[in-house]
Image (cartoon, rainbow, N blue to C red):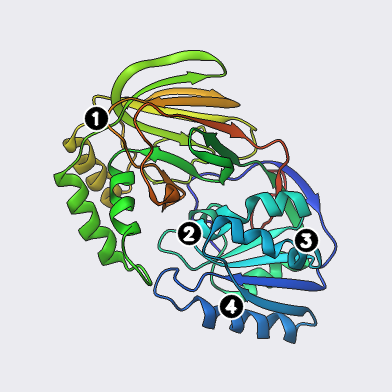
Amino acid sequence: MKNESAFLPKGTLITIPSPQKVLIIFNPISSAGNTETLAHEYGKFLAHHGMAVEVCESKKKMKSYLLLETAMTGHDLIVVVGGDGTVRKLLPLLSKTDTPVYMVPGGNESLFAHSYGMSANPEDLLRAITDGRCLEQFYGLISGNGIQGEKPFFIMASMGFDSLTIKQIGKRKGPISDSAYVWSGLNALVFLHHPIVTVHVDGQAVIDCQSGYVIVANSAAYARNLQLVPTASPSLKKLVLGFLPGAKRQHELIKALRMLQHKPAGFPLQYFSGESISLTLHRPSYPLQVDGDYFRNRDIEAGSTIKFNISQKPIKVLIHTDLPPCV
């Protein structure tokens, strides 16, 4: 199988025993809404190969995911059928229970799955189970004004054209199609404006009340052909801040063209890395998108400071045999 990621995932490599009990969690509204059927097909496939399988539906609210902890603790492997938002909400439980995870891409992007060469072919999952290799990977946590506790993310969080687009998509109900992204993107482009922010990285001021596109990344997977944050990696235990000062509409048109050409964006982003990033948003309020979701379904209020930190404990990601043995 061909690895479609724009980078080779790295991290501490460990070997796990062959799982006997597998929990499959599906998100019913991911992509075209066929994840439930796909989850049960995987369940039958794994059961045919001697594993005890339980299939359950993901929860809508972040706090409701806590109800899955008991079920996860009693299993040797978690298989997620859905998009990046489904994995995102499971991250704290995955690190707490130390249960390996594999993702069957069922979302419009499924960046997590594609980063590790995961596919919708059950034979690929079976090969990964047989090989039993996992990577230890870190993730990000968001806290701050008006945010209760810490909210996880794996790929990135951003403010700009993409967060305005995701806000429009977040108003829709039911399965989300590719056409929804197109229409929401056109709407966002018409009303595009960028946030005004002050940013500190590990306590040091790096941006002082400037307007521009902002991305805090834990992985280089986002818009992988564009290589907006090429140095971000979930194995480094550091987050990467990318900032494009004075971003304009033409930047988004260039991005669209470069994506079609499968070429890097080539934008003059400023980069900073660290374990802790704090961002103060000045006027006006602005949406934040996190791993493809409209964060908390409401904008970050003007004057608020939000903090991005790297997790102290990693998760285990079951990987494919065709990835290099010394990643």
83 w.r.t. 142: above or below? below
Label 3 belongs to which residue?
132
Callout 2: SS: loop
- The image position of residue 237, as x and y in percent, is 65, 32
Amino acid on which the number 2 mark rests in the picture: Ser
Amino acid on which the number 1 mark rests in the picture: Ala
Q: CA separation, marks 4 and 3?
A: 21 Å
Q: CA separation, marks 2 and 1?
A: 27 Å
Give the mark nearest the N terminus, 1 or 4.
4
Q: CA separation, marks 3 and 1?
A: 45 Å
**Residue 116 seen in render:** no
Label 2 belongs to which residue?
110
Task: Tell us which disc is closer to us: 3 or 1.
Answer: 1
Label 4 belongs to which residue?
39
Label 2 packing within 10 angstroms: few (<14), some (14-19), many (20+): many
Give the mark nearest the N terminus, 4 or 3.
4
Residue 23 located left or right of residue 27: right
Label 1 belongs to which residue?
247
